[in-house]
Image (spheres, grey):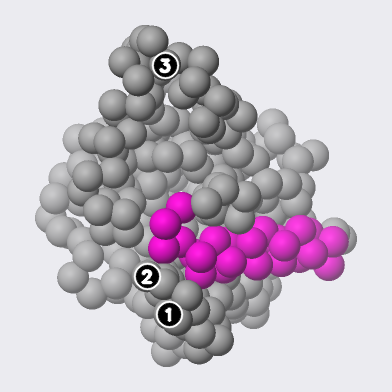
Amino acid sequence: MDAGPSFAGKVVLVTGGTRGIGRAIALEFARRGAETVLTYRWGTADESELRAAFAALGAPEPMLVQADAAEEADTEALIRAIGGRHSGIDVFVSNVAGSVVVRDFDAMTERALAKSIHYSSWPTFAYLKRLRAAFGRYPRYVIAMSSSGPDAYSPGYEFVAASKAVLETLCRYATYRLRDEDVRINVVRAGAILTQSATEMFGSELFPFLDRLAPPDYQWLTMEEVANVAVALASGMLDSVRGQVITVDHGDGFSDKLMRLYAEREALGL
């Protein structure tokens, strides 16, 4: 194990933790000794493969619980399952996201918006309330996963972006409301990463297309880099950071625009 924080004796809950960024975060915490609880929806996890990945790191075996974050009955069952093994949660990573893909203006409906917020925004706070009620304390660290959607256009992403904006706003307000509690709530905005979710949302041609327009020798953001930020926020060294939206994107949010393509047009063959 490399130098850095140890999470031995700590319990980390990661919703949507069996694939993509959630999985990377769970593995990084577990590699540092944490007991992990990972949730997933039906059919989205190969439990044998996942357990093998943790074992390969010499990490504690994860507790896997099938639970839809938007279903109250599943949340109740999850809390009971956690209580049967642990006395509480020390770190809560809210990674679940689900939304209606908007194909055109007619698809923008109030019902679809409400559904997106119900699934991608509210579970963070529903879980916080339930964890406090069940264990008498909040997790010391809460990390909600967001994206650049609220500030940058992506096709069909309207309701994901809207739900992430709601999530970020409520995290700031929750920080104020819980300012006297031993809890630190922050948001991590991850830049463009090749994940199964991104492929499902935007199509398999997205990243090959982006590769053609990326600067020479460009290095894409990795899930492990995002995981390291989550670990740092829960390490105890950043306890003064609360209610913040932290962007992890190699600084690309500044330069990813048409003027960059113009400036590098010769190198890119444009």
Direction left: furthest residue:
48
Q: Residue flagged by tag 3: what amino acid is it?
A: Arg
Q: Residue flagged by tag 2: what amino acid is it?
A: Arg
Residue beneath label 2, please? 103
Horizontal and vertical percent position of residue 158:
51, 65
Give the secondary structure at mark 3.
helix
Looking at the image, which is closer to me, 230 or 99? 99
Instruction: Tell me which residue sits at (41%, 72%) in the image.
Output: 104
Quote the CA–CA distance across marks 2 and 1: 6 Å
Mark 2 surroundings within 10 Å by alpha-carbon count, few (fewer than 14), some (14 through 19), many (20 or more)? few
Closer to the chain start, of discs 1 and 3, is 1
Residue interval drawn in magenta: 154-178
Give the secondary structure at mark 2.
loop
Horizontally, is 256 left or right of 202 in the view?
right
Horizontal and vertical percent position of residue 14:
44, 57
Q: Let me know if residue 156 appears in the view.
A: yes
Horizontally, is 28 left or right of 244 in the view?
left
